[in-house]
């Protein structure tokens, strides 16, 4: 018979085994390999900071890594705020007293259960430069047509305003599938005490002021959660990027993102050292971004009330 | 938010937004039923000139759909069993038992969630290959038996809400910890376990990176990866591609409609308590 004190570690032992083999060992190994030249064929050879130097150089001169960094930043900077804005807006709309509310909610959520592989097939068809319905609709509205997945995206505000390229198409896909975040906002709005709205109304606040001074502050912890998760997930975006470019990041590297660049470096070029260094850089940058967001949180996230 | 009747313009805005969200899926289904020549000659016509249901059997026979489906189901079943059992056992150790260092170890578990998959990808791949799991679905299933930080966290939060008196009473009756776990905690946690099962099923069904890394033999591909092979070789056969995509999406939609409450509650709690 085990004593209860030893039972605890026994119960968590499956995770402990997984932690040691699949997290701790790989964590240490990839840190060491990031300082090595390692092509799987011969044992890792220590090269000091060589891999990091190469990455820094590519970042400065706009090499493959620099391009991937810019593409990833572009994608995260657009898709995260857009999906938060859309999610909050839709959630607020869904609290209106409207018949068929549950049906609307399901329809907004539905795109997020569509598997990425299927969603990629679908959006490549919708955004086909020649036969796609999106370009055709833009034409009806008198807006110039874009190349979408087949074209360049070089600036957040492109020279021709509606000249959309591959990264914009990826942003569109991400925003379309962000209904799961909307569900979180919706649940959080449901938890806001109605007395707050009644008090605001007694003070003569209209719908807009009630939104700005009650809903938004009360939602801020959830918005913060989605912001952090959104940044982490979008920086790690891989599957859809791989699929729409058939695993190349083409055309001309316009949709080459960090994850894809890393994957290709490791499993196509067998450049394990360089890939490990990039993974560690990615980790440190994400950690920095998360800490930074937590620092800013105390200025705009309101933890009083329901959220503790 | 006003709980009064809503302005018609606001209602219109909601309907427009819904239409924009739903349209891609409607368009996918409609286009998948159009004859091939309609998609090249008149792709914008809303209705199919002829409802070409034969696109579906044709897509089915153009790829080894049933074999891929079988692999997907093996992958999903194995992973769901692995995740639910291992995460429940581990979560019990983190919530219903007191032992020295528990909270510190739990902190480590939480910290692992912040680690991007890139950092562990390469050594993990080489390790699993050393263990002889390369080119086998086991490479994707075995790790689920070692727990997942997020699911463990989810279950621990749920287990903590179960009153301790229940365990105490059971201990007085002479039940051991394993008995308390299987006879009391597990039956009381069915909704939380269902959430884990559902999320793991979806993750395995959709998993693309795993097969991309670990599988090389087309005989072993699950649907998500098999479909991608199909996409690259049939890129000019849009009607077949879309039919295949619809068939791959349909199980997820049906699952969502059947388990809508589990879905929505699961996502909402992860967001608010996370």
Image (tube, coloured by chain):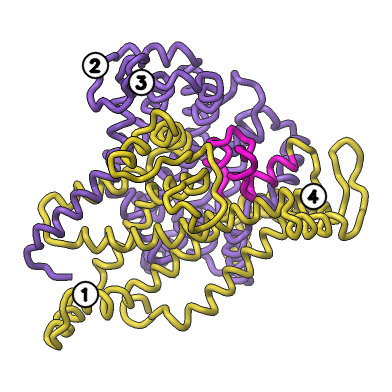
Left or right: A30 in relation to B45: right
Q: Is residue A158 above or below residue B168?
A: above
Circles 4 and 3 on the same subunit:
no
For the N terminus of chain B, the quadrant is: bottom left
Secondary structure at numbered mark 3: helix
The x, y position of residue A204, in whole percent, is: 13, 85
Same chain for mark 2 and mark 3? The answer is: yes
Residue A123 screen position, x and y as percent: 42, 36
Chain hosting mark 1: A
Check disc 3 and report the residue beneath it: B39
Q: Which residue is mark 4?
A: A274
Which stretch did the figure color magenta? A237-266
Instruction: For marks 4 and 3, give the CA distance.
Output: 45 Å
User: Is disc 1 in contact with disc 4, using a CB cutoff of under 8 Å?
Assistant: no
> Which class describes the residues within 10 Å of circle 3: few (<14), some (14-19), or many (20+)?
some
User: What kind of element bears circle 1?
Assistant: helix
The residues tagged by marks 1 and 4 sit, at their Cα atoms, a distance apart of 52 Å
Residue B158 visible in the displayed image: no
Report the disc number at residue A208: 1
* Position above or below: A12 against B44: below
Depth check, mark 4 against mark 3: the one in front is: 3
Q: Which subunit holds the residue at mark 3? A: B
Q: Which residue is mark 2?
A: B49
Magenta stretch holds residue A263 = yes
Q: What shade has chain B been given?
A: purple
* Occupied quadrant, residue B244: top left
The secondary structure type at the circle numbered 2 is loop
């Amino acid at each position: 018979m085990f004593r209860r004190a030893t039972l605890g570690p026994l119960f968590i032992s499956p995770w402990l085994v997984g932690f040691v083999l699949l997290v701790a060992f790989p964590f240490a190994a990839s840190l060491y390999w990031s300082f090595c030249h390692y092509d799987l064929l011969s044992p890792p050879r220590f090269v000091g900071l060589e891999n990091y130097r190469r990455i820094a150089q590519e970042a400065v001169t706009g090499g493959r890594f620099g391009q991937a960094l810019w593409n990833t930043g572009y994608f995260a900077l657009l898709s995260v705020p857009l999906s938060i804005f859309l999610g909050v807006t839709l959630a607020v709309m869904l609290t209106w007293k409207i018949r068929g509310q549950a049906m609307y909610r399901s329809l907004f959520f539905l795109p997020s259960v569509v598997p990425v592989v299927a969603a990629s097939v679908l959006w490549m068809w919708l955004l086909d430069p020649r036969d796609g319905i999106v370009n055709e609709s833009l034409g009806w509205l008198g807006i110039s047509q874009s190349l979408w997945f087949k074209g360049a995206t070089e600036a957040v505000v492109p020279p021709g305003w509606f000249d959309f390229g591959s990264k914009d198409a990826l942003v569109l896909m991400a925003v379309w599938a962000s209904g799961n975040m909307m569900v979180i906002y919706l649940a959080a709005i449901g938890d806001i005490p109605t007395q707050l709205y009644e008090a605001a109304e007694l003070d003569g606040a209209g719908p807009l002021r009630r939104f700005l001074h009650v809903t938004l502050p009360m939602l801020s912890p959830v918005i913060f959660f989605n912001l952090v998760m959104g940044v982490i997930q979008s920086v790690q975006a891989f599957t859809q990027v791989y699929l729409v470019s058939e695993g190349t990041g083409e055309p001309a590297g316009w949709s080459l993102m960090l994850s894809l660049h890393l994957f290709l470096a490791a499993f196509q070029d067998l450049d394990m050292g360089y890939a490990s260094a990039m993974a560690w850089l990615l980790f440190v940058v994400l950690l920095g971004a998360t800490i930074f967001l937590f620092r800013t949180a105390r200025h705009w996230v309101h933890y009083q009330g329901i959220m503790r | 938010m006003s709980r009064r009747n809503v302005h018609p313009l606001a209602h219109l805005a909601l309907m427009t937004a819904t239409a924009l969200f739903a349209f891609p899926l409607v368009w996918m289904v409609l286009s998948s039923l159009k004859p091939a020549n309609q998609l090249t000659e008149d792709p914008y016509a809303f209705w199919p000139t002829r409802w070409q249901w034969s696109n579906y059997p044709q897509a089915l026979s153009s790829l080894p759909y049933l074999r891929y489906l079988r692999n997907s189901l093996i992958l999903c079943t194995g992973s769901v069993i692995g995740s639910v059992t291992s995460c429940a056992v581990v979560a019990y150790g983190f919530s219903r038992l007191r032992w020295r260092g528990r909270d510190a170890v739990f902190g480590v578990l939480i910290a692992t969630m912040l680690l991007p998959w890139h950092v562990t990808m390469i050594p993990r791949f080489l390790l699993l290959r050393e263990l002889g799991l390369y080119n086998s679905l086991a490479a994707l299933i075995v790790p689920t038996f070692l727990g997942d930080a997020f699911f463990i966290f989810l279950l621990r939060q749920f287990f903590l809400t179960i009153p301790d008196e229940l365990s105490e009473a059971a201990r007085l009756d002479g039940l051991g910890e394993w008995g308390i776990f299987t006879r009391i905690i597990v039956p009381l946690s069915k909704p939380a376990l269902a959430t884990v099962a559902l999320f793991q099923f979806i993750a395995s069904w959709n998993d693309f990176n795993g097969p991309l890394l670990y599988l090389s033999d087309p005989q072993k591909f699950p649907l998500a990866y098999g479909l991608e092979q199909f996409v690259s070789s049939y890129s000019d056969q849009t009607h077949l591609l879309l039919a295949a995509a619809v068939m791959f999406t349909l199980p997820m939609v049906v699952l969502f409609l059947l388990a809508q409450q589990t879905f929505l509650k699961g996502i909402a709690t992860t967001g608010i308590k996370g």
